[in-house]
Image (cartoon, grey):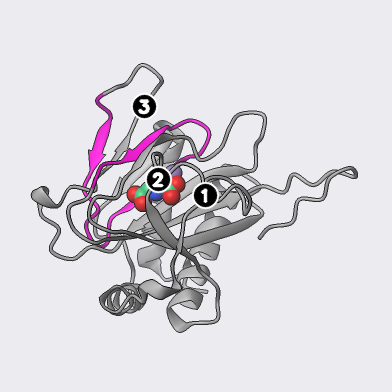
Amino acid sequence: MMDDSSSQALFERIAIDLLRDGYSILPNAFPEPLSKALSAHSQRVDTDAFKDAGIGRSTEHMILETVRKDAISWITADTPVGSLWLAWAASLQLYLNRRLFLGLFSFESHFAHYAPGAFYKRHFDAFKGDTNRIVSLVAYLNHNWQPTDGGEIVIFKNDADVAGLKVPPRFGTLAVFLSEDFAHEVLPTTVDRHSIAGWFRVNTSTTKAVDPPR
Ligand code: OGA
Ligand code: MN
């Protein structure tokens, strides 16, 4: 696990922001060697590995091209970049559990590719009562992002917030937020746009319903 002091300072900043605001936006946040690996990965993304994203879990895939138009590829530890990413996410999970007593139990994440014209309309990653995704983590992989490229994530602070907080998807930027509390959207991109979206979950298994992580 990577737990060098630079990541510890970053993790503390995320914890403080989550406590105070419920979200944290951090530019230039990737530690080495993760940054190098993600950079190399984003230069040679194999779009064949991406599936068009569906809404919800596994079923109901064809729906709602009107809601989201990205293509995704789930991340596993089978590749060097996947294993570095998952190790880093695991050390963040451990930090947040120790610092905020969140009881995060697992982490799932995917690469996402938004082709020109793609977007993802305003949504929540989790619904109250249906709680298992607790913390959302998005990492941006776009070198040389320009304002005309679009594809910003907009994070809404509450239901009445229509302007939101607009965050450019620049390489190295991390957006972390409480999954149930922050609706967000991805504005249409005019260029190929790459990101990682991930979720820390709690275990909501009961004796009646087993809830395995993916
Ligand atoms: C998601 C999501 C945001 C982004 O996949 O749920 O909101 O900026 N992604 O890629
Ligand atoms: Mn989302």
Position of residue 182 relative to residue 40, above or below, is above
Which of pointers 2 and 1 lies earlier in the amino acid sequence? 1
The answer to which of 75 and 86 lies nearer the viewer is 75
Q: Range of the magenta residues?
A: 163-188
Image-based side of 191 in relation to 198, left or right: left
Disc 2, disc 1: CB below 8 Å?
Answer: no
The answer to which of 25 and 165 lies nearer the viewer is 165
Where does residue 42 sit, x and y in percent of width and height? 30, 73
Q: Is residue 173 magenta?
A: yes
Describe the element under mark 2 as helix, strand or loop.
Answer: loop
Quadrant of the image occupied by residue 49: bottom left
Q: Which residue is mark 2?
A: 68
Where does residue 193 sit, x and y in percent of width and height? 26, 59
Position of residue 143 relative to residue 153, above or below, is below
Where does residue 149 sit, x and y in percent of width and height? 14, 52
Q: Which residue is mark 3?
A: 157
Describe the element under mark 1 as helix, strand or loop.
Answer: loop
Query: What kind of residue is marked 2?
Result: Arg
Ligand 1 contact, mark 2 (Cβ < 8 Å): yes
Q: Is residue 150 magenta?
A: no
Where does residue 199 sit, x and y in percent of width and height? 53, 51
**What residue is rendered at 31% in x and 72% in y?**
35
Distance from disc 2 to disc 1, alpha carbons, whole Å, reads 11 Å
**What residue is rendered at 26% in x and 42% in y?**
187
Q: Which residue is mark 1?
A: 62
Bin the neighbour count of mark 2 within 10 Å (Cα to Cα): few under 14, some 14-19, many 20 and up.
Answer: many
Distance from disc 3 to disc 2, alpha carbons, whole Å, reads 21 Å
Query: What kind of residue is marked 3?
Result: Lys
Query: What kind of residue is marked 1?
Result: Met
Describe the element under mark 3 as helix, strand or loop.
Answer: loop
Image quarter in which the C terminus is found? bottom right
- Foreground mark, 2 or 1, reads 1
